[in-house]
Amino acid sequence: MTAGVFSCRMCGACCEGAGGIVVSPEDALRLSRFLDLSLEEFHDRYTEPSGTKRRLVSDGRGRCVLFRDGAGCGVHEAKPAVCKAWPFFRGNLMDPVSLSMAKDFCPGIDRDVPHDVFARAGRDVLAREGLAARDPATEANTLIPDRER
């Protein structure tokens, strides 16, 4: 995605962990169309409520239900904004310690990139791709822009 800062290895590490993949209304519509399902069918099969938001359910092993062993993301072309934005989450952009922890489990993040360089590149990606959240009631908190942008 961003040479010298991040290059996805398609390892699936970011697809693990129950309850973290928030699906915005725009994401849900795009995913339902991609999967050739009605919006209601998509929500019934793949999401669950989480306060005012919806999130993708996890399989029995703690992975995103849309992850396919041996094939990776089953909806890569239509994946949620929060997935497209990884690893450029607010915490990683604002906090060097958070970025250091992300580097420990994500092999795609350049281990030697300084935090300020990573943060600048990440903000550019979020802006260029239109991934910053606009509605904190329905979109991922990790994509809500910080006040310093």
Image (cartoon, rainbow, N blue to C red):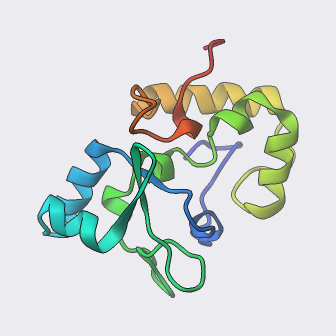
- Tell me if 89 is positioned left or right of 55 in this view: right
Question: 14 or 114: nearer the eye?
Answer: 14
Identify the residue at horizontal 85%, vertical 35% (top origin). Answer: 96
Task: Give the answer, above or below, for where 60 lies relative to 20.
Answer: below
Identify the residue at horizontal 73%, vertical 38% (top origin). Answer: 92
| Residue placed furthest toward the top | 148
Residue 132's x, y, as percent? 47, 30
- Tell me if 62 is positioned left or right of 103 in this view: left
Task: Give the answer, above or below, for where 22 lies relative to 126.
Answer: below
Residue 33's x, y, as percent? 16, 60
Q: Could you say which quadrant of the image residue 8 lies in?
A: bottom right
- Tell me if 55 is positioned left or right of 118 in this view: left
The C terminus, quarter of image = top right
Task: Give the answer, above or below, for where 17 lies relative to 132.
Answer: below
Q: Could you say which quadrant of the image residue 63 lies in?
A: bottom right
User: Total number of numbered labels?
Assistant: 0
Task: Give the answer, above or below, for where 113 lies relative to 84.
Answer: above
Quick check: can you spot residue 98?
Answer: yes
Question: 72 or 145: nearer the eye?
Answer: 145
Identify the residue at horizontal 28%, vertical 44% (top origin). Answer: 25
Quick check: can you spot residue 75?
Answer: no
Residue 115's x, y, as percent? 82, 32
| Residue placed furthest toward the front | 51
